[in-house]
Image (cartoon, rainbow, N blue to C red):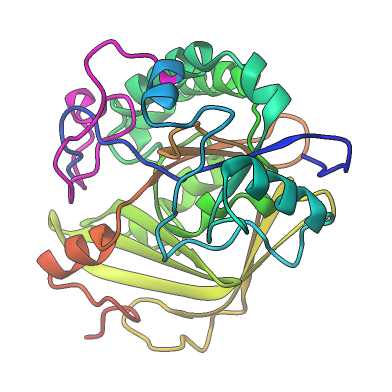
Amino acid sequence: MARARGHRLLALSILTIAVGDAFLHGGRSGAAFRRSVAMSSQPPSGPPSGESIADRAKRLGLTPDGGQQQPATMRSAADPAADDNSSFEEAAAMAGFNELPPNSVVFDKTKFEAYDFEAEAQAAEEVIRVVGQLKAFGVDNSDKGKWPELKAACDKLAQATAASPAPVLRDDARLTGDWELIGTTSADMEKRKGMSGLGGAMFTAPVTIFFRFDNGRVVAKEVLSFFGNPVVCNEFRGIFGFSADGNMVQERYESADIGGQKNTPGFAGATATLEGVCITADGALRLGLTPGGGGSYFVFKKLGDGERDGWLGSKGLPLEGGTGF
């Protein structure tokens, strides 16, 4: 969203609401997915059953005259990449702050008031339903049959969020932090059974892939099982940046620990580019699409503070670097 001087902007807080059953990594049951994609590290504290996102926004004070303090771990929306600092000053004044709270997300006020939050919620629920039927986030052989259904659900969510008041991905502080890949229609990912290509080895299977975005650095951790046990962790490290319009994010991986080799000599680097289709209003889901006609969808779930590390630690996997043998 271009921050033109003529637009009125709205400072909103970054809140992820935990609703319904906790999500269990490595299991992909439909019951584990409810609206807002509940975080396993936090007890449910969401809205009453049946409450719409629009009503939820009002209840939490996310109305055109509201603004709330943000978690300290999130990147500031007043990023140097912003093209009009006066808009942040205006948004802060509207929210009752002398300056914009750290790590705020700035929503367009006009779009916010006209946006159909309920349509987004229904579309997101359908994506969650389909993802819950996948065995291995879309890359297992059995998952391919669900790709058309997942694509249709993602298309619907993309359409529902086309008029979202959220800023472009470059200026959306909610990108910062940990994400888990929970669904994809990528034939390339399915062929390699993940990122490294080792997920298709004998007695080996993909479990999950985590991504951490922080201060221009990105770390991906691919977890594989061996004889059913998640004992292999490959780590990819690099940087990320955005297209000129802020709508696309590119991850460029420069080093990796793969197959038990630290700083794997044979790794020549890798690049991934995704269009930032949307981050849902509650910050729980992120939808990306590979550029070009007939692109592949990637669905990510936002993780709570410490959730990724807690899960890795519970499996005896390293928080930094890959597994060694």
Residue 112: x and y in percent read: 63, 24
Residue at 77% from the left image edge and 31% from the top image edge: 293
Residue in the foreground of this view, choosing between 192 and 220: 220
Residue 31 located left or right of residue 98: left
Residue 172 magenta-highlighted: no
The span shown in magenta is 25-53
Total numbered labels placed on residues in the image: 0
Residue 189: x and y in percent read: 50, 48
| Residue 137, above or below 242 | above
| Residue 228, above or below 124 | below
Residue 19: x and y in percent read: 23, 29
Residue 179 located left or right of residue 152: left
Residue 53 located left or right of residue 172: left
Residue at 29% from the left image edge and 70% from the top image edge: 233
Residue at 48% from the left image edge and 16% from the top image edge: 123
Residue in the foreground of this view, choosing between 307 and 27: 307
| Residue 199 lies in quadrant | bottom left
Q: Quadrant of the C terminus?
A: bottom left
- Mark yes or no: residue 294 visible: yes
- Mark yes or no: residue 127 visible: no
| Residue 67, above or below 54 | below
Residue 15: x and y in percent read: 39, 42
- Dominant secondary structure of the magenta stretch? loop
Q: Quadrant of the N terminus?
A: top right
Residue 29 magenta-highlighted: yes
